Amino acid sequence: MLRLCSLFAPLALLGACTTTAPSSIPVARPLDRAYIACRTPEHVNALHAAGANFQREVDNHMADGRCRRFAAGQKVVSRASDSFVDPGNGVKYWVYR
C-alpha cells in the first residue's frame, strides 16, 4: 500500500499544479506626459462642467483626494486611452482631457 501511494502522490501533485491558472504580473509603464486624473468618471465630468470655475474645482478635487496630478514618466499599470491604475495603491484613475 505504501508503495502504491508513493507512486500516485507525485502524479496527483503534478495534476494539481497544472490545473491552476498562471498568474501574470502587470507591467508598469511610464506616462508620456503629465496628467490630471480622478478616481471616478463623474469627477472628471465635474471638471469639464466647471467652466470659469475650473481652477477652483481642480484645487478642491485635488485637496480632498478626488483627483491627482501624475507626472510625466511616472509608472502606471493597465494604461487605456481614458484610464490607468496606479501601481502604488492599486486605484484606477480616469484621465482628464
Image: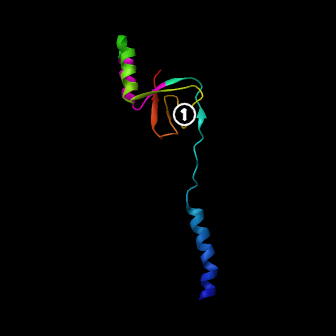
Q: Residue at x 41, y 32 (%)?
A: 39
> Residue 85: x and y, percent?
50, 36
Please, which residue is most extreme toward the front here?
63
Which residue lies under the disc numbered 1? 79
Describe the element under mark 1 as helix, strand or loop: loop
> Residue 87: x and y, percent?
52, 39
Q: Which residues are magenta?
A: 36-49
Q: Is residue 46 magenta?
A: yes
Rendered image quadrant of residue 2: bottom right
Q: Residue at x 59, y 71 (%)?
A: 13
Mark 1 residue type:
Arg
Q: From the viewer's perspective, is 93 left or right of 6?
A: left
Depicted 65 relative to depicted 50: above or below: below
Q: Residue at x 63, y 81 (%)?
A: 6
Q: From the viewer's perspective, is 61 left or right of 88?
A: left
Towards the viewer: 76 or 45: 76
> Residue 60: x and y, percent?
36, 22
Q: Is residue 44 magenta?
A: yes
